[in-house]
C-alpha cells in the first residue's frame, strides 16, 4: 500500500541523510549513529531475554547485530582519530 511505501521511503531518506553527513564528518550525524547503536544494543539484549518462541530463531542475528553496534559505538567513543574527524 501507499502508506507502507511512504514509511519505507521516509526511512530510506533518513538513513541516506545520516550516512551522507556521517561521511562528511558532521558531529550531529555521529551522535545519531551513537544513539542508533545504543538502541540496537538494547534491542539485542532484550531479544536474548525474550521467551517468545517465534523470536528465538532470530536470537543469533540479534546478538550479531548487537555486537556490531557495540563495536561501532566503542570505536566512535574511544578512537581519537574518529573523535577529531567529527569536530566539524
Image: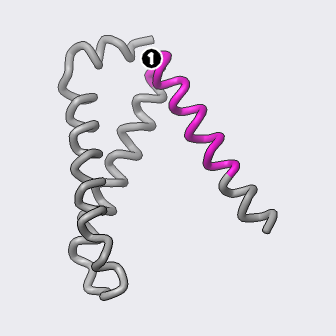
Element type where label 1 sits in the image: loop
Residue 39, given in percent of the width and then of the height, sits at: 36, 53
Residue 13, given in percent of the width and then of the height, sits at: 65, 40
Majority SS type along the magenta span: helix
Residue 44 lies within the magenta run: no
Residue 32, given in percent of the width and then of the height, sits at: 45, 37
Circle 1 crowding by C-alpha within 10 Å: few under 14, some 14–19, many from 20: some
Quarter that holds the N terminus: bottom right
Q: In which quarter of the view is residue 33 placed?
A: top left
- Left or right? Give the position of 23 relative to 86: right
Identify the residue position indicated by label 1 in the image: 25
What's drawn in magenta, residue-wise?
9-27
Q: State whether residue 33 is above or below residue 20.
A: below
- Left or right? Give the position of 11 relative to 72: right
Q: State whether residue 9 is above or below residue 17.
A: below
- Left or right? Give the position of 15 relative to 63: right
Amino acid at each position: 500500500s501507499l502508506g507502507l511505501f511512504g514509511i519505507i521511503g521516509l526511512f530510506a531518506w533518513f538513513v541516506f541523510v545520516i550516512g551522507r553527513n556521517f561521511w562528511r564528518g558532521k558531529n550531529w550525524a555521529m551522535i545519531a549513529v551513537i544513539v542508533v547503536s545504543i538502541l540496537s544494543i538494547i534491542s539485542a539484549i532484550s531479544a536474548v531475554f525474550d521467551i517468545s518462541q517465534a523470536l528465538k530463531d532470530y536470537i543469533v542475528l540479534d546478538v550479531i547485530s548487537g555486537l556490531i553496534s557495540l563495536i561501532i559505538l566503542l570505536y566512535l567513543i574511544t578512537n581519537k582519530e574518529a573523535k577529531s574527524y567529527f569536530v566539524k
